[in-house]
Image (cartoon, rainbow, N blue to C red):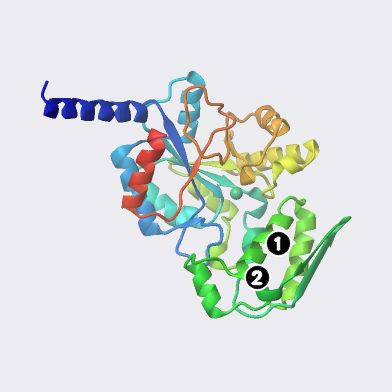
Amino acid sequence: MTMLQRYVNKGREVLNRIITSVQHKGIILMYHRIAEMDVDPWYLCVSPENFAAQLDVLRKHARPMSLQKLAAAVREGNVPPRTVAVTFDDGYANNLYTAKPLLERYDVPATVFVTTGYLGSEKEYWWDELDQALLRPGTLPPRLSLTVGDNSRNWDLSAASSYTEDEYRNDCARAPKSPRLSFYYSVWEWLRPFPDASRRKMLDAIVSWTGRDSHLRPTHRSLLREEVVTLAQGGLVEVGPHTVSHAMLSHHTEDIQRQEIEESKQCIERLLGTSITSFSYPFGRYNETTVSLVKQAGFTAACTVENSTIQQGSDPFQLPRFGVFDMNGRVFERQLLQWLRT
Ligand SMILES: [Zn+2]
């Protein structure tokens, strides 16, 4: 065998290994918003242009499949090669007006997980309301104190008190984060585990502390109830619940968890007149009690935010997902192939 043949054979071997590893695995993608946004502290927005390019890549390299079909394949231990399911969390209105037409154009099924307490709400999702209060250029008072029951927390803003136009633009451009953005993350982290009613009071206190107005931005609004019905029309998009209040389930009592899971399921079932079987854990946080409650409520699949591939034997109630950022088609193609090989 010549040296050249040996290289060719070696190359074939590597290629076969890659092809084999790409087969027999599936992945679930997690999106939130298809929109152009200035400041996007959680990297949740994918532009419509990039989303279209990503769907084109999925059509070229993968086998798009609904989450329900993928979950059934997981249960049967027979995940078809290169399977990809698309999901959206939270329930932003742009899922209907921007994402759905593109999903239809590329014939890619998707599941949208909706936080039912926000349907038609005059309030933005709490993390967006916090971003509106804190991430606007201008000066804030030097100290913030929040108290809920026995819990209290004080922030001395120091450098975060002022927030210049330049710092704001840098935060939008994802340059090293400003003291104000770090302050936002810190307040967000502290608010996250509280029950919704306590968090609501603290958000009101924060908005009043800023001395600024708070309004529902059209770019940040959640779906209306009738829009959920329109979203599900045609059968390409499945709708599932994401709790009532976007609760961090693992931090709550069994009773609160049950209420968040069951009420959100019943709400969508009433709207759509059909039984709902897919669920998504907010913040990807859950415990054994959560999984058992999700099973008891009659779901057949539940999604986490653990970044990994679906393998034969994966648990349909702990399905991992890869979060997709605002990547153009070329970058997404590389990323997708790498995920499928992982
Ligand atoms: Zn969420």
Judged from this view, the residue extending furthest toward the right is: 150
Image position of 240 with respect to 43: above or below: above
Q: Where is mark 1, residue-wise?
A: 187
Residue in the image at 45% along x and 53% along y: 325
Amino acid type at mark 1? Val
Check whether the beta carbons of the residues at disc 1 and disc 2 lie within 8 A of each other. Answer: yes
Q: Quadrant of the C terminus?
A: top left
Q: Whole-percent x and y of residue 230? A: 49, 49
Q: Is residue 86 left or right of residue 125?
A: left
Asked where in the image residue 339 lies, by quadrant, the reply is top left
The dot on residue 134 is 2
Q: Is residue 324 left or right of residue 246?
A: left
Amino acid type at mark 2? Leu
Residue in the image at 61% along x and 77% along y: 163
Q: Quadrant of the N terminus?
A: top left
Image position of 315 with respect to 112: above or below: above
* SS under mark 2: helix
* SS under mark 1: helix
Q: Is residue 89 left or right of residue 18?
A: right
Mark 2 Cα-neighbour bin, 10 Å: few <14, some 14–19, many ≥20: many
